[in-house]
Image: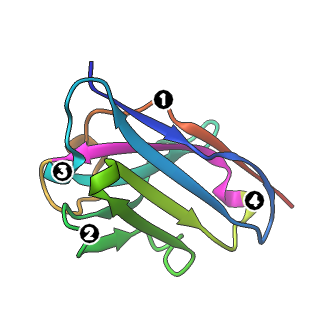
Amino acid sequence: QVQLVESGGGLVQAGGSLRLSCAASGRAFTISTYAMGWFRQAAGKVREFVGAISRTGGTTNYADSVKGRFTISRDNAKNTVYLQMNSLKPEDTAVYYCARTTGTVRDKLFEYGGWGQGTQVTVSS
């Protein structure tokens, strides 16, 4: 079964950095054929868009709340997408998910599929 697996979460102090990874596992699944997105869900809140990257990595799109602090990149040879998070704030605390879309760098939840289990990011003040 094709699955996306997120990793790299943890506990970090405000102002710190983390890099999340999203790797495809299971049967042959080439992420290079998909645009990839990152979303997050804080406790008691709806899942929200964080950012997305096009199939080749040439185009990215970010939520205003993370613009200038977060960077998405991809290594198609490694079948992995990354989310570099700098200058973290307590309000960035959430479970972070990656997913794939057949479209471009979309920001709508319903346009994505293949959700992973998520990785917890906790930012202390």
Place of residue 108 in the rendered image (x, y in percent of width and height, measured from the top left)? 27, 52
Place of residue 125 in the rendered image (x, y in percent of width and height, measured from the top left)? 87, 61
Label 1 amino acid? Answer: Gln
Seen at 39% across and 66% down, the residue is 73
Residue annotated with mark 1: 117
Q: Which comes before the other along the chain, label 3 or label 4?
A: 3
Horizontal relation, residue 88 to residue 117: left or right? right
Residue annotated with mark 2: 57
The label number, if any, that marks residue 90 in the structure image = 4
What's the magenta bit mostly, secondary-structure-wise?
strand
- Highlighted magenta segment, given as a residue range: 91-101
Tag 1 near tag 3, CB within 8 Å = no
Place of residue 118 in the rendered image (x, y in percent of width and height, measured from the top left)? 51, 36
Instruction: Residue lying at the far top in this picture: please name it.
Output: 1
Horizontal relation, residue 75 to residue 101: left or right? right
Of circles 4 and 2, the one toward us is 2
Residue annotated with mark 3: 34
Q: CA distance from mark 1 to mark 4?
A: 22 Å
Label 3 amino acid? Answer: Tyr
Q: Which comes before the other along the chain, label 1 or label 4?
A: 4
Tag 4 near tag 2, CB within 8 Å = no
